[in-house]
Amino acid sequence: MSDRPQYDEWEFEEQHRHDVEWLGTTATTGTEGAPGMPVFLDRERNEVFRAETDVERQLLSEVTESTRSTAESSVTEVIQNIGDELGWERLSEFGEENS
């Protein structure tokens, strides 16, 4: 199991988010050699997105081009699609329950 943080207590750089759930960390970013990124569910916006991390400041920045809607696909489908594309290094408890 990875020793990466779970991101539960981290803040988002651009805006305050009220109803965001950490789903897990991808195994890769899709770029050869690049480590994975944490993935979050924003319940308020019905979106799943990846985030870049600033470990020293425990700060997250949304990668806007990674956003996927959960209005048209279920959270389960989005989790499975991300797993098919990038693999999962680690899923949160919520991510496991919904995969």
Image (cartoon, rainbow, N blue to C red):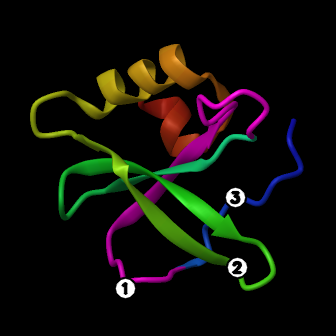
Query: What is the distance, in whole Å, between disc 1 and disc 3 at their CAs?
Result: 18 Å
The segment highlighted magenta reads: 12-34
Q: Secondary structure at mark 1?
A: loop
Residue 6's label in the rendered image is: 3
Q: Which mark is residue 16?
A: 1
In this rendering, position of residue 67 left or right of residue 60: left
For numbered disc 3, what is the local secondary structure? loop
Looking at the image, is mark 2 or mark 3 earlier in the sequence? 3
In contact (CB < 8 Å): disc 1 and disc 3: no
Label 1 to label 2, Cα distance in Å?
Answer: 14 Å
Q: Is residue 66 magenta?
A: no
Residue 96, quarter of picture: top right
- For marks 2 and 3, give the one nearer the viewer: 2
Q: Is residue 21 above or below residue 68?
A: below
| Image x and y of residue 10, in percent | 61, 77
Dot 2: within a 10 Å radius of its alpha carbon, few (fewer than 14), some, or many (20 or more) residues?
some
- Neighbor class of circle 3 (other Cα within 10 Å; few <14, some 14-19, many 20+) is some
* Residue 42 to residue 94: above or below: below
Label 2: which residue?
A: 58
